[in-house]
Amino acid sequence: NTGKPDELRIVLLGKKGVGKSATANTISGTKLFKEDFASDSVTIVCQKESTNVAQRRINVIDTRGLFDTYISNDEIKKEIEEKEAVKLIQDLFGEESRRYTMVLFTRGDELQNKNIEEFHVFNNKETRDQTQVTALLEKIDSMVTANGGSCYVNEMFQKVEKDLQVEQERILKDREEKMEREKKELRAKHEAEMEKLKKKQDEERKIRERELSLKGSGSIANYLRHLCRINIIL
């Protein structure tokens, strides 16, 4: 079915404090989702609410914020956090998820005169303006149609999990092989040093034995000369 589905599921993902809960309220036309204008995360667990919009059943799922930990207000860190949030979503749900994903900008009043036609802009301060919700649903319907009427399903997520597991196993194997190579290198280095030390000790021992031998030969010669003197005197 490539037409408009009778029921639509919208999952809101993003970093903490960007207005996911406020957006959920704007879409559903309710105040069922707890929201706060501070930059801290309000949603602790996922929340699902259903409502009727334009004679259709819409299920809105609000999720806990990504990177839900304290981060300073430094602008560079904020920029990195925004990029990492998008990357984390792609890593978690795989490249296939891009076909089922739309970037939604909140605080549309702050995005005036910006060339962002390829995205959708939301102004959560204008909760009574349902035209922005209708426009969003039309874009989602177009995306669903482009995907043959399908949605992101659990099998896709399981495939991503399997791919991640394979990648983790590969990384672990590479790490173990690297550690084994380093152990062999250390063992070979140690054996070479021990062999060098043994060779040095053998050379020093031979030198000492030669010196002792020479000393011993000199003592015998002196003893024989002494005996010869005694015989001559006698």
Image (tube, rainbow, N blue to C red):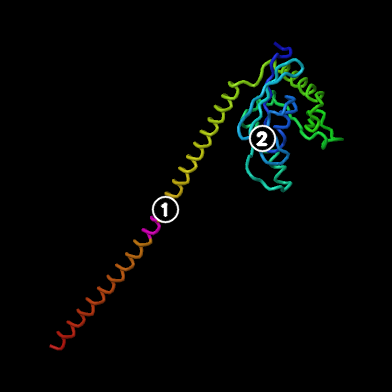
User: What mark, if any, has residue 112 been given in the picture?
Assistant: none
Q: Of all residues shown, which one is farthest toward the top?
A: 1
- Residue 69: x, y in percent? 63, 42
Q: Nearer the viewer, mark 1 or mark 2?
A: 2
Q: Is residue 197 in the magenta section?
A: yes
Magenta segment: 194-199
Q: Of the residues shown, which amino acid type is indicated by label 2?
A: Lys
Q: Is residue 93 in the magenta section?
A: no
Instruction: Please tell me which residue is depicted at 72% across the width and 12% down the height of the picture.
Output: 2
The residue identified by callout 2 is 87
Residue 89 horizontal side relative to residue 196, left or right: right
Task: Give the main secondary structure, helix, strand or loop, of the magenta stretch.
Answer: helix
Residue 177 horizontal side relative to residue 108, left or right: left
Quadrant housing the N terminus:
top right
Instruction: Please tell me which residue is depicted at 42% across the width and 56% down the height of the picture.
Output: 193
What secondary structure is marked by label 1?
Answer: helix
Dot 1 alpha-carbon crowd within 10 angstroms: few under 14, some 14 to 19, many 20 or more: few
Mark 1 vs mark 2: which is more N-terminal? 2
- Classify residue 214 by image quadrant: bottom left
- Residue 27: x, y in percent? 74, 25
The residue identified by callout 1 is 190
Instruction: Please tell me which residue is depicted at 56% across the width and 28% down the height of the picture.
Output: 161
Q: Of the residues shown, which amino acid type is indicated by label 1?
A: His
The reply to whether discs 1 and 2 touch (Cβ–Cβ < 8 Å) is no
- Residue 19: x, y in percent? 72, 35
Distance in Å between CA atoms under marks 1 and 2: 45 Å
